[in-house]
Image (cartoon, grey):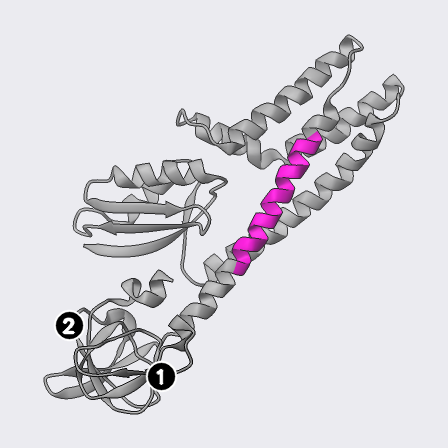
Amino acid sequence: MKKENISISGMHCASCAVSIERNLQKQDGMKSANVNYAMGKAYIEYDENKVKEEDIAKAVASAGDYRILKEGSDEHKHHLDSIKVSRNKFVASSILTLPLLVAMFFDMPMQFAWITLFLSFVVVFITGWQFHRGMFSQLKHFKANMDTLVSVGTLSAFFYSVYAMTIDAHLYFETAAVIVTLILLGKYLEAKSKGRASEAIKKLFALGVKKARLIENGKEREMAVEDLQIGNILLVKAGEKIPLDAKVLEGNTFIDESMLTGESVAVEKNVGDQVYAATINGTGVIKIQVTKIASETMLSQI
């Protein structure tokens, strides 16, 4: 079984995550799939002999307008672009909505109704197009999400107001515009918080090490941490970081676990004791046996 964390773009609400999760779980050979909307990630465990990467990508895409992001720069660039686009849409929508709110408090002549129609049209169908696109994408799969609610609400207010112009009734163009503007504000704040969370996670993973000293057949060689397996024997010298969660096989030392516990006093470790990835070996040279691969360590769980 292979465990993997994948980043997914295009999710707008919790129901999006549920749709993707259900599609992934339907795959033959998929043991478990959990999609976290807040982090924009899916945590999956599957039989790589039955499930291929292309199958996973198709399952995600078939749930709606979603795609899998590549790790690294692509993912980081996506967060930055998302913040910039969200901010620009909110600013544009706010500028166009403000006159509509002012007009709401005054008895404007019929000629001004055409101006409110134009301003509302730009807000609803241009800055708010993402909601309508999301609704139609979900309708193709006979599903609904938050986009459906926003789209139906704004379109109803807009088209009723167009009809109301012909019968000289009260108009609700500002209602449609305000709904879109407030939702866009929420999207902007959400994108910023996700960006900060992403940066915090990157800094947390930076605490880990990339290479480890593997003891194999009595010989020592360097090996990438990602390639280590459960049961591998590693050598850790004084002052070095523990590569992965493991138990002590030989030696006695004091480990600085402050990055995990916040406790500044080093903890004594003897044979059989558990040590954790990214903690610092203080005084002695120890041999450890890996108990968790890179994606399952305490650091990864955090």
| 176 with respect to 243 (left or right) | right
Residue type (three-letter) at the residue carrying disc 1:
Ala
Q: Is residue 14 left or right of residue 287?
A: right
Residue 266 is labelled as: 1
> What x and y, as percent, mark residue 3?
26, 56
* Residue lying at 25% horizontally and 46% vertically, measured from the top left: 32
Q: Which residue is mark 2?
A: 231
Report x, y in % for residue 185.
65, 43
- The chief SS type of the magenta part is helix
Tell me the SS state at disc 1. Answer: loop
Gap in Å between the C-alphas at discs 1 and 2?
A: 26 Å
In the rendered structure, does residue 194 fall within the stretch colored magenta?
A: yes
Residues rendered magenta in the picture: 177-196
Query: x, y percentage for residue 217?
Result: 10, 84
Identified by mark 2, the residue type is Gly
Q: Quadrant of residue 299?
A: bottom left
